[in-house]
Image (cartoon, grey):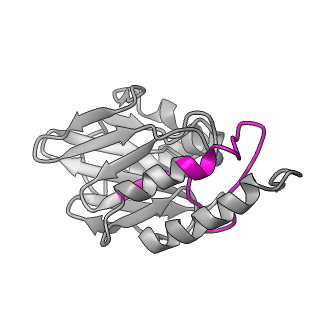
Amino acid sequence: MEWRELGDGVFFRRYQPWDVNVGVVIGAAGVLVIDTRANATEGAELRGHLRQLDTRPPRWIVNTHAHFDHVGGNGCFPEADVIAATDATVDLGDRSVRVRRLGRGHTGEDVVVLAPGVVFAGDLVEESGPPQYDELSYPAEWPATNRRLLDLIGEHDSVVPGHGAVVDRRFVAAQLAELQRAASDPRGSGG
Ligand SMILES: [Zn+2]
């Protein structure tokens, strides 16, 4: 997969292995990268690919959550600030990006990134498979978090899941029903 422009200066690229998505927002004041792949080798490859979009080294990194396949390449961007604060607004000069924590779900620390016309949802939304639960997940709280997410997604916004193809508001609404079923299953969510 190559870079795909989803909005003005807003890109994503789908990577193997892990079918993980990386986001990029390019502004006059710098380049912001959302997630950095799984390890230093993949991060270095990402760094090379970013030069296809902009020759400036990334100035900001946002990690949607702490799973290895989203943070493992961070060390390849030593000059970037990792945005750890939630409810941060990053001023890219001619556009801004909001980083919001909406509640617990896939992990206890998921953040979403709101760029012009595009919402990067991390693993709160999954396209390439069902929502993924592990020991870091909060199945009972996840539906409320995604309800808040839904409120932030415009009718025409693109939604980039943590893994898989770009979706939209309707897909997130449909997956919310799935999360609600899992939350009400006393045996837990499995998988
Ligand atoms: Zn994850």
Residue 102 is at least partly visible in this image: yes
Relative side of 144 to 79, left or right: right
Relative side of 48 to 54, left or right: right
Residue 62 or 110: which is nearer the viewer? 110
Q: Main secondary structure of the magenta part?
A: loop
**Residue positioned 32% across, 71% down in the render:** 155
- Give how far across and how far down residue 97 sits, in percent: 26, 44
- Give how far across and how far down residue 156 sits, in percent: 30, 72
Residue 84 or 86: which is nearer the viewer? 86
Q: Which picture quadrant has residue 62?
A: top left
Relative side of 151 to 125, left or right: left
- Asked if the magenta segment contains residue 138, the reply would be yes
Q: In what quadrant of the picture does the C terminus appear?
A: bottom right
Q: Which residues are magenta?
A: 119-144
Identify the residue at the far right of this view.
187
**Residue positioned 38% across, 47% down in the render:** 113
Q: Is residue 110 above or below residue 3?
A: above
- Give how far across and how far down residue 132 sits, in percent: 71, 54
Residue 168 is at least partly visible in this image: no
